[in-house]
Image (cartoon, grey):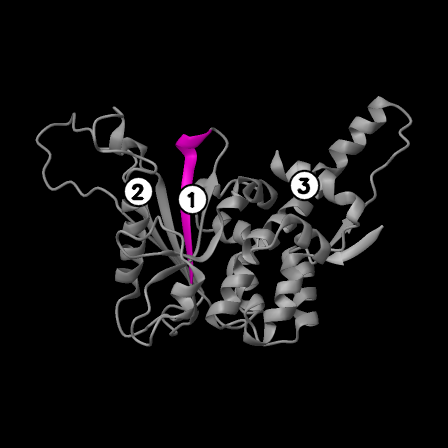
Amino acid sequence: MTIIQTTLAKDIEIENLDIRYDKSVKRVLANTPLLAPITKYTVRELKNYSIPMVEKCIDADSIQVSEVFVEPGLTNRKILNDELENKLPGEGRVIFDIRFTITLPGGSKTKIIINIEAQQKSNPGYSLLNRGIFYAARLISAQLSVEFTNDGSDKEQYDNIKKVYSIWICMDCPEDKKDSIVNYSFEPHIIYQGSDKLKLYPNCDLMNITFIHLSGKPDQSHHQLISMLNTLLARMDAETKKKKLQEEHNLPMTIKLEKEMNDMCNLSSGIREESRLEGRLEATLNNIRNLMHTQNWSAEKAMSALGFDVSEYPKYIALLQN
């Protein structure tokens, strides 16, 4: 049995010195073991789900880190590397930090589009809420001809718009915001009601902007998510940080890779063993997917980095394709 670090643990080690800076924090936050608690505590549809269940709802293939323009007309086009490398000072385009989708049990009707932004300053000189509204509005409008149509070919048309959440993790917060999570969304305000039969539109909270205001001190907050993010972004050595995240916040820092069992006593024992390993196998596949998407690696290169034996490649490649 080989025990190795998870992708999250490796990313913390690599990025720890610069973890509060843009590129580093986005790379670390894009790990599904972190996306799961962030969304569980901010997306109301997930509040009654366990962390493992939330992680299963995350579409790992949809995770995009600095790959999507916010600007109108460009959101559905993948960013090319040279567009980032060749941009001039003052000409930089607005790009979503992290964007991905969640699908709740029940199918496409429960698909949710998530954007996560890591914000160093919660008072950047303009209203961060206005910026959040703009980002969320772009997540809505970019769905035209992707999630919904307005040309009459689909009778549901605008009813196919998927709910969006733009979640902002604010690090350096003033005292009047520290240690809080605040959600902003649409809700009806009745201006006049001439009949008691008035029926309001359902699902008016399609657009949500949520701010996670950190306190900056790992042991200060009593909220699980804020405490975890405070620890993740704290200035401490990587080993201490990984230990605290694993012991206090149940974030996996190691995984066990077991050789396939060749000798089964009987079919029933094989079925029991398969069920027992199902959760661990899914976590292993998620680690491979994370490396493939965050590093733009092939499956083989990702498995090599994770310490897989070459003989195991075909089995896991087949599972990744299912």
Q: Secondary structure at mark 2?
A: loop
**Which residue corresponds to mark 1?**
44
Crowding at dot 1, Cα within 10 Å, few <14 / some 14-19 / many 20+, comes out as few
Q: Residue at x 30, y 65 (%)?
A: 128
Span highlighted in magenta in the image: 107-117
> Which secondary structure dominates the residues rendered in magenta?
strand
Q: Residue at x 27, y 56 (%)?
A: 134
Classify residue 128 as left or right of residue 215. left
Crowding at dot 2, Cα within 10 Å, few <14 / some 14-19 / many 20+, comes out as some
Q: Residue at x 65, y 57 (%)?
A: 7
**Which residue corresponds to mark 3?**
317
Classify residue 6 as left or right of residue 233. right
Percent position of residue 273, x then y: 80, 33
Type of residue at label 1?
A: Arg
Disc sitting over residue 178 in the figure: none
Type of residue at label 3?
A: Ile
Label 1 vs label 2: CA separation?
11 Å
Q: Secondary structure at mark 1?
A: helix
Identify the image quadrant of residue 247: bottom right
Queried whether the magenta region covers residue 108, the answer comes back as: yes
**Which residue corresponds to mark 2?**
205
Percent position of residue 30, x then y: 53, 56
Percent position of residue 293, x then y: 55, 52
Q: Earlier in the sequence, mark 1 or mark 2?
A: 1
Type of residue at label 2?
A: Asp
Percent position of residue 88, x then y: 33, 74
Q: Is residue 222 visible?
A: no
